[in-house]
């Protein structure tokens, strides 16, 4: 007799299927529970964590678009979320001023630049200014864009991987493979920049902002900075300072964190100064990711040195 549709057989299959669904659901829940929750203080560290941790981490970088994470202050709810994370990745070098103002669990903190803290650059620039909604601030003290030296960025990535391995040793091999690939790509950027800048080691360059100190040191840039913002046309006194600087440092190229307003660009071009947009990528970019932004930066910087892309 054909028993297809037999109530007993259907009930058996239904019971088996329910068991499979329950098991899969349990596995999925266990995998989700096993994920590391990682909070970071800037986008480069978020990118490193995402690349290294893959599917085994949830990475959160809550600074709003348009803010400068170095001077951003999270609200109470966001600070509470940081406190509940499994890992809190810090940049070090006095980055993210808010960290010193709140209580964060020490055992969860990872200062990713600690291996080279003896190589931090200090700055005497104490001009107070404002960009974005972060309020007024100055750049005196420790230079903090450590990742613009890609050899340092590779060491920061290693600290991220070590912290993840410690908390999830079962995935240590995957984390190791991922960080190795990331470091390889970072050192390719490093080698390319050395190749570019070696062609004209004394080429004078200007910067619109004092954020390129580690870039200049690592790759031998003859760089001097002013204190201008991309979205603001400099006032008369700023242009006077610029003119005086040009007399002792005759640069024809100027690095900017972003495209300057048209009026600034036009006046610079009329003064014989061309624009190079080199984005530090402190915050998450609107398009692409850390690696694509840095590749575009390097391509832009190759032009002053007359090096083919």
Image (cartoon, rainbow, N blue to C red):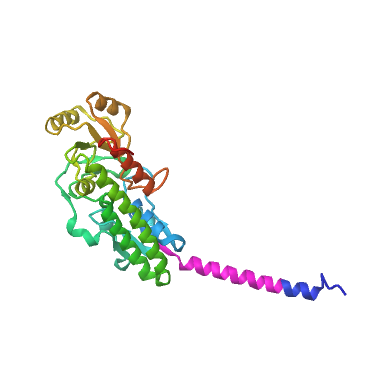
Magenta highlight: main SS? helix
7 displayed left or right of 22: right
Place residue 78 in its image quadrant: bottom left
Question: How many tags in the picture?
Answer: 0
**Looking at the picture, does residue 108 appear above or below residue 227?**
below
Q: Position of residue 189 (x, y in %)?
A: 31, 49
Residue furthest toward the left? 248
Query: Which corner quadrant holds the N terminus?
Result: bottom right
The answer to whether residue 18 is magenta is yes
**Looking at the picture, does residue 232 appear above or below residue 175?**
above
Place residue 35 in its image quadrant: bottom left
124 displayed left or right of 297: left
**Looking at the picture, does residue 132 appear above or below residue 108?**
above
Magenta residues, as a range?
Answer: 14-37
Q: Position of residue 80 (x, y in %)?
A: 37, 60
Place residue 15 in its image quadrant: bottom right
Residue at image x 23%, y 54%?
94
36 displayed left or right of 70: right
Closer to the camera in the image, 165 or 94: 165
Closer to the camera in the image, 22 or 2: 2
Can residue 104 be seen here? The reply is no
**Looking at the picture, does residue 47 appear above or below residue 106?**
above
């Amino acid at each position: 007799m054909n028993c297809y549709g037999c109530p007993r057989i259907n009930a058996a299959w239904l019971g088996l299927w329910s068991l499979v669904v329950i098991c899969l659901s349990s596995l999925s829940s266990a995998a989700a529970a096993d994920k590391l929750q990682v909070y970071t203080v800037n986008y480069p560290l978020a990118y490193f964590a995402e690349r290294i941790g893959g599917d085994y981490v949830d990475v959160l970088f809550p600074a709003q678009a348009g803010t400068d994470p170095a001077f951003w202050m999270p609200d109470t709810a966001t600070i509470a979320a940081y406190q509940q994370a499994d890992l809190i990745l810090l940049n070090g070098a006095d980055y993210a001023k808010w960290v010193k103002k709140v209580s964060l669990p020490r055992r969860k903190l990872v200062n990713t630049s600690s291996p080279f803290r003896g190589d931090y650059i200090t700055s005497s620039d104490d001009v107070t200014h404002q960009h974005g909604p972060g309020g007024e601030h100055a750049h005196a003290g420790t230079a903090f864009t450590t990742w613009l030296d890609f050899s340092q960025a590779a060491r920061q990535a290693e600290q991220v991987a070590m912290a993840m391995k410690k908390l999830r040793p079962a995935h240590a091999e995957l984390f190791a493979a991922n960080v190795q690939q990331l470091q390889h790509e970072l050192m390719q950027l490093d080698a390319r920049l050395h190749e570019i800048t070696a062609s004209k080691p004394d080429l004078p360059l200007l910067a619109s902002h004092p954020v390129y100190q580690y870039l200049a040191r690592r790759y031998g840039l003859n760089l001097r900075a002013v204190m201008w913002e991309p979205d603001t046309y400099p006032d008369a006194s700023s242009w006077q300072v610029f003119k005086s600087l040009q007399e002792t440092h005759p640069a024809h190229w100027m690095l900017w964190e972003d495209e300057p307003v048209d009026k600034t660009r036009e006046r610079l071009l009329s003064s014989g100064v061309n624009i190079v947009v080199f984005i530090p990528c402190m915050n998450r970019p609107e398009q692409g990711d850390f690696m694509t932004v840095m590749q575009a930066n390097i391509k832009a910087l190759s032009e002053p040195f007359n090096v083919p892309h």
